[in-house]
Each structure stands twice: as C-alpha cells, then as structure tokens.
Image (spheres, helix red, strand yellow):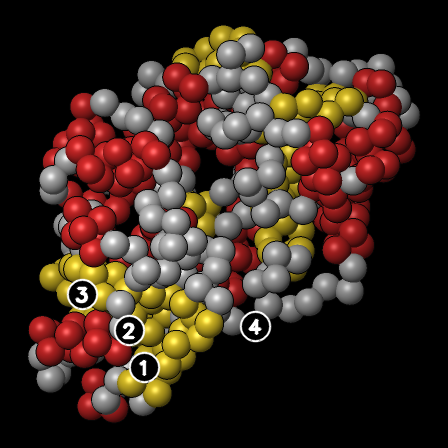
Amino acid sequence: MEFKIKYFKDYVPFHVDDSHHPVELNPKQCPAVESEAAEVRRALAHPIGTPRLSEIVKPGEKVVIVASDVTRPAPSWVMVPCVVEELEKAGVKDEDITVVFGLGSHRKQTEEEKKRLVGEEIYSRIRCIDSDPEQCVHMGTCKNGTSVDIFKTVAEADRRILTGNVEYHYFAGYSGGMKAIMPGVSSHDAIQSNHKNMIRPGAYAGHLEGNPVREDIEEVYHFCPVDFIVNVALDDHKKIAFAAAGDRIQAHREACRFLDSIYKIKIDKPADVVIVSTGGYPKDINLYQAQKSIDNAKHAVKEGGIMVVSASCKEGYGSTVFGDWIQKYDTPDDRIKAIHEHFELGGHKSAALALVQKKCSIYLVTDMDDAMVTKANMTPFHDLQQAVDAALDKMGKDASVYVIPVGGSTLPMEE
C-alpha cells in the first residue's frame, strides 16, 4: 500500500506491503462554522452552567479577561471583542477592564504582538498587559503542596474571565479551562510544582479524571475563583470550529468532548510499528516541537514496538534547556530519574520523550546530525522508506502497522 506523509514543507511517499494490513489513522472532517465571531456569540448567549456573563458582572467591578500569549493558537482577536460586547451589556466601562496575557513561563511580548492578539480596536480601548511571574499574590496552597501564587492584577480583580483554546496536552490532558490561571498567570515556583506531577500515573493526553496535573490545576479555583470561561476548539486551519462558554468545568468539558469527536481515534489494539508525521512545518521545525506528535503516537504503539517519526528538525533540539538535558544524561532512565529529583521546565520534555522510549524504540527520519539523534537515544535515518523497511524487518513479517499523517492533532486510544 502506498502512503504520503508530510516532511517539513513536502509530502514524502513510502510503501508498506499489504501483508501487514496497514491502517491510516486520520481525524474526522471538522465542520466549518459560518462565522467564527457568530459561533463565539452563540456560546456567550447560551452559557453552560452559569447565567449569561452580562447577568453576572456588575457596573463598577474590576474585570480581568485572561487571554493566551503569542505562543498559543487561541484566536483571542475573535474571543476577546465578543466578551467585551457582553460586558458592555452589563454596563461595564472600558476603564474597568484589563486584558492579561497569561505568559506562564514564556517570554514577555512586544506591544505589536499584544495588539495583534486582541485586534487594534480592543488594544486602543482597553488596558492590555502581560502577566508577570515576579509580581504574584499568594492565595493558598493545594493539597499536594502547589503554591497558588497568582499575578497581582488577576488576584485582585472582582471578576475573572478566562479565554483559550482546547487541544490535547501531553500531561494536563487538555489545554483550556483553569489552565489559563495555572500555569497561565502563576509564579515560576507554582508552575514547576504543578508540572512535577507529569511523571505520575494518569498524566497523559486526553485524560482528565484521575489526572494529577489537571486535578491540581482545577483545585486552584478554590483559592482564585473564576466567574466565566470561553473556550474554543479549532480545525486543522486553526479556525474556530466550536465554542463553549460558562462554568469553568462544564463548558471546558463540552469543548473537550467536541475535540474528541474529531481528533480522538479509537483503535482495537496497539500496533508493532507506528509511522507518524507531525504534519510538517512548523510542527517539525525542531525536536522540542515534534515531541508532541511522538507523545500522541505512543498510545498507538505496543510495548517493545517501533515508532518511525518523520520530522525534519532543521533547527535541532529547539530549546537550550531541552538540549542540555539530552546532552547531560545518557539514557531515558537517567532523564526520568533527574526530573524526579529536580524538575526544570524544558528538561520536562526530555523526560516526557524518555517515558515514550521506555515503551518503544524511535527511528527518527530527520535533517538533524546523526550524533544529536543518537545522543537522544533514537536511531537516525535520512530516508523514510529505509526507516520503514528497517522497522518492518526488525518486527517481522506479521508486524501490524498504523500510519498517522498528522500526529500533532490525532490522539489514538484503545476502546
């Protein structure tokens, strides 16, 4: 059987013999909405689990809208103006509204980036600022010891509204919901404490109940209450396909269900060989970005199997800390042990990669230097067909095969 998957900006063909009964795993077709703004307004007009936002907020109250930073695909320029419209209906004045971009552990943004995120009109009318992990108020401590340290402007607001997009997250289960608060507007120490839970059982993509990272995130509500959320699910073109608004849990879960209906693919059992592409540029620009597809695809490969990853990684490891951890530690076990002993953002992705490598071998088809690939405990290839043939030879003539063309947005899961 013939296949084509993306490698950087091109499609690369390869062949798998029909005797292996290869199965391609693709997301379902995502329904288009007539208008992104109309979809958000529909959600605002029919909130889940709360009254309308215009019935919650009162004139004179200080209102904060938390929005995603420039590293996220959330279309804040659609969501934030719609939220402001609702606030206007409640009689809230522009001077009582602040848009806070949740940076988490990311860099500060330029004024031009802030303007682009919310649109020129909102930027000219309403105060728009970055969160600052150094300017936090201590509001409590979660039961597992995570300190609830929240950016001062958010902590001191009368009303808190969260916006964001819902997608699979490799240890929080999904993005969205209370994740805009933790880690979005939290201190570095709080973020590190929360993220340490990633190596505990239950912390994986598409999983919420019993996920220690997500449970920690949602416990923050009891110290820093949130009045309303607007979450959207995006199609393959990063356009809004569905919006849910209202209660921080109920609306978030509705958006997660929509995401699952499109991107969660049920499989009968894991395969011996899984061939996965990130979907190409920019998701395969470096190994740090490609790791998400590797983590999603791990659910489709059996213990002791082989994952063939098509990822250019022209920019190498893609993160200084991530690269340092790969260079410093020799084995997956070493990296997992190290993250237990001293959690470090960036290093956590090397540990996540190591956890996949405990399950299966990874053959990386890449532009990266062979020595860099080998140091990351993967087998380097520069030809996709050669990597596929090598994997099938190793796993034998009866090896089962899955092909995942868009690993970044496909989550295979057993029934």
Cβ atoms under marks 2 and 4 closer than 8 Å? no
- In the image, residue 27 above or below residue 342: below
Give the mark nearest the N terminus, 1 or 3: 1
Residue type at mark 4? Gln
User: Mark 2 highlights which residue?
Assistant: 384
Disc number at residue 306? 3
Q: Are marks 2 and 3 in contact (CB under 8 Å)?
A: no
Looking at the picture, tell me which residue is in the foreground, 326 or 259.
Answer: 326
Where residue 81 appears, as percent x and y from the top left, is 80, 39
Q: Can you say which quadrant of the picture contains the C terminus?
A: bottom left
Chain-order first, disc 2 or disc 4: 4
111 or 303: which is nearer to us?
Answer: 111
Secondary element type, mark 2: helix
Q: Are marks 1 and 3 in contact (CB under 8 Å)?
A: no
For badge 3, the amino acid type reads: Ile
- What residue is shown at x 11% (from left), y 40% (from top)? 330
Quarter of the image where the N terminus is located: bottom left
Question: Contact (CB < 8 A) between labels 1 and 2?
Answer: yes
Q: Secondary structure at mark 3?
A: strand
> Residue beneath label 1, please?
14
Tell me which amino acid carries mark 1.
Answer: Phe
CA gap, disc 4 to disc 1? 24 Å
At x 35%, y 87%, the residue is 2
Point out the tag, 4 or 3, that comes first from the N-terminus.
4
User: Which of pointers 4 and 3 indicates the residue nearer the eye?
Assistant: 3
Q: Going from the N terminus, do you reach mark 4 or mark 1 first?
A: 1
Residue that numbered label 4 is attached to:
29
Disc 4 residue crowd, few under 14, some 14–19, many 20+, Cα 10 Å: few
The percent coordinates of residue 365 (x first, y second) are 28, 65
Please report contact status of discs 4 and 1: CB closer than 8 Å, yes or no: no
